[in-house]
């Protein structure tokens, strides 16, 4: 889970730098570099990603997994909407529609990344025996 949280923070930082500072699509609090954003990144994204991944129906059927991702997409859009209304987040050339398109991919990516990390951890002993 730590690896997933750190990866979520780093990916979000890189995406935010490009979409906020380079393309000026959206941002946190004020335009430009904002140190308050660090609090949001560390205080919100790791706990939310842990809740999402800990509750994921790993043994469920494909429909259950897709439904779970859809529900979290709705939750994420509501979070975006509330963030914009409260001033935590501002949109320039971005919209909730774009977020709705991006969230299913990012949530699926988080799930697949955790599965890869777990697979690598399980098979670590094989690599040590084979290549040591």
Image (cartoon, rainbow, N blue to C red):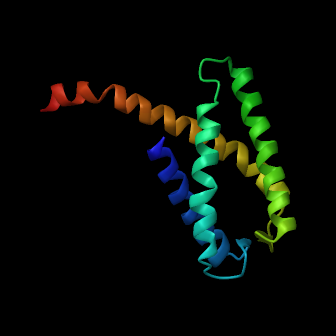
Quadrant occupied by the C terminus: top left
- Along the viewing direction, whichever of 132 and 36 lies nearer the viewer: 36
State the image quarter where residue 58 is shown. top right
Residue 50 lies, in percent from the top left, at 58, 41
Left or right: 3, with 104 as reference point:
left
Q: Residue at x 74, y 71 (%)?
A: 26
Question: As drawn, is 41 to the left or to the right of 101?
Answer: left
Q: Which residue occupies the extreme right position in the image?
A: 85
| In the rendered image, the vertical position of residue 127 relative to residue 2, given as above or below | above
Would you say 36 lies left or right of 29 here?
A: left
Position in image of residue 30 (x %, y %): 72, 80
Residue 104 picture quarter:
top right
Q: Residue at x 17, y 26 (%)?
A: 130
For the image shown, how many numbered marks are present on the structure?
Answer: 0
Which residue is pictured at 45% across the width and 34% down the height? 116
Of residues 29 and 26, which is closer to you in this image?
29
């Amino acid at each position: 889970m730590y690896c997933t949280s750190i990866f979520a923070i780093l990916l979000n930082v890189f995406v935010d730098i490009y979409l906020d500072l380079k393309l000026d699509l959206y941002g946190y609090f004020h335009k430009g570099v904002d140190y308050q954003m660090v609090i949001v990144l560390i205080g919100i994204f790791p706990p939310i990603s842990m809740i999402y991944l800990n509750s994921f129906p790993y043994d469920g059927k494909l429909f259950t997994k897709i439904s779970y991702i859809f529900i979290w997409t709705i939750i994420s859009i509501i979070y975006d909407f509330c963030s914009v209304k409260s001033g935590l987040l501002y949109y320039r050339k971005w919209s909730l529609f774009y977020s709705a398109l991006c969230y299913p991919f990012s949530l699926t990516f988080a799930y697949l990344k955790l599965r890869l990390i777990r697979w690598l951890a399980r098979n670590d002993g094989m690599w040590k025996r084979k290549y040591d």
